[in-house]
Amino acid sequence: MKIAFVVPNMFKTRAFDAIEPLVFAILAARTPDDVEVVFWDERREDVPLDPTVDLVALTVETHTARRAYQIARQYRALGAAVVMGGHHPTFMADEALSHCDAIVRGDAEGVWEELVADFRAGRMRSVYTQTETADLADLRLDRSIFKGKGYAPATVIQYGRGCKFNCEFCSIRAFYGSCLRQRPVADVVDEIERMNHRHVFFIDDNIFVDTDKAKELFRALIPLNVTWSCQMSIDIAQDRELMKLLEKSGCAGALIGFESLNPENLKQMRKGWGVKRQDYETSIRILQDAGVMIYGSFVFGYDADTPDSFAETVDFAVRNRFFLGNFAGLMPTPGAKLYDRLRDEGRLLHERWWLDPDFRYGNATFVPRGMTPRQLTDGCHWARTQFYTAGSIFHRLWDRDTNIRNLHRAGYYLAANLVFRREAQAKHGQILGGDMALVPAEAGD
């Protein structure tokens, strides 16, 4: 028996900022030893049509759904069975099942082993749902499948799952529920030591969902002498003890979802907590004083946004010398309350933009209140372009606490900005997936 793990790409072009997809390291470690496993990541390589594959497993995000369905059709035509997992099949089960043989809803641990056993016995069901909370103390990984893929030079580590916040545009709470889980700190430390890599990226959606446990982790990281980065919420800057631990443990960078500078927008998206006790710029300075390079993420299209919001936001990000920046239009995705609200208000331009052959990456997907869809599309593109001009890159470099703290940081800053500048331009306006029609296919077609 042969199983192929596949990561579909959004576009035909390669992604130079791709990181290791840990979900397949988890599945590989839970696949019986007598099953042959191959792994293809379309972000880094072509996905071959291998007629010897019996079962294809795809991880599917909303942006990659169209491409995943195309790959599934090709493999089903060869006689292989196809299973899909991830956020999109979890929330769009009927849609996914019209393109594959089975889906996994929720976490895969435990469910995957059952699915493989059922497939071998010829009784694979169409839906496998995780009904129990996966114990992260039992997290096992087989990273050998990543060898030679050319991922970004960082060890990707998962410490916990879930988020304590419930922002309107986000589907994390809908996927994980209110259950917040962390791995034993000793297991994380052991994994980092075994990987023997100088830079670690914690892939958690928000590593600070439990402040006390986060502090325990950071104290354990101090003697490892590594640098690390993560995704975090801005509210942690209010905890001075935590800031000291960030610096001592080697935190070099953080992706922070600022989302908007407008208090009305923050209230509407249920993210007003970020500025409840102190304003953004105070929090930014506290983080930068601790040596944290900030990758700021912003979204446009909430009701209080106007065409002036783009320039105001870019000016804010440049003035505060952010390491990197992301400027995107709101993307209503299944599972998020935002999608349901915009659909109910009749404001969606495409009921399922991820499948629409006329949709292009970067295009507005709904009608905003304070501008036209075209203004939203063009404004986001302008913001990304403006943030990554040579003048902006040079100006933002000059923060001695963060971006030029040492020669290594300065070199990393310049390399990352050039990659993100190229990626921002390369992705804009591309069609999701390929040109193949999305007619659901039966196995053997």
Image (spheres, grey):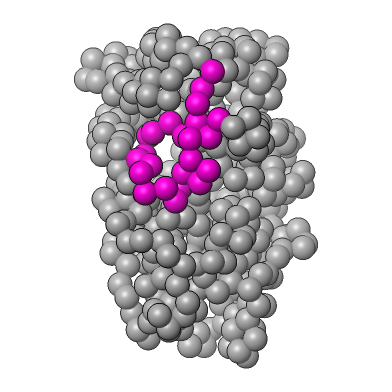
Q: What residue is at 56 percent from the left and 59 percent from the top? A: 95
Using the image as rendered, state which of residue 197 and residue 229 is in the foreground. 229
Q: Position of residue 126 (x, y in %)?
A: 63, 73
Q: Is residue 367 magenta?
A: yes
The answer to whether residue 33 shows anywhere in this view is: yes
Q: Residue furthest bottom?
A: 121
**241 versus 427 height, above or below:** above
Q: Position of residue 70 (x, y in %)?
A: 39, 64
**207 versus 20 height, above or below:** above
Identify the image quadrant of the C terminus. Answer: bottom left
Instruction: Write down the region rendered in magenta.
Output: 347-369
Judge left or right: residue 173 versus residue 60.
right
Q: Residue furthest left?
A: 390
Q: Position of residue 431 (x, y in %)?
A: 32, 46
Answer with the quarter of the image where residue 339 lies. top right
Judge left or right: residue 269 versus residue 231.
right
Q: Is residue 239 magenta?
A: no
Using the image as rendered, state which of residue 341 and residue 153 is in the foreground. 341
Q: Position of residue 238 (x, y in %)?
A: 67, 18
Q: What residue is at 42 percent from the left and 48 percent from the top? A: 356
Q: What residue is at 38 percent from the left and 20 percent from the top? A: 375
The answer to whether residue 196 shows anywhere in this view is: no
Answer with the quarter of the image where residue 360 lies. top left
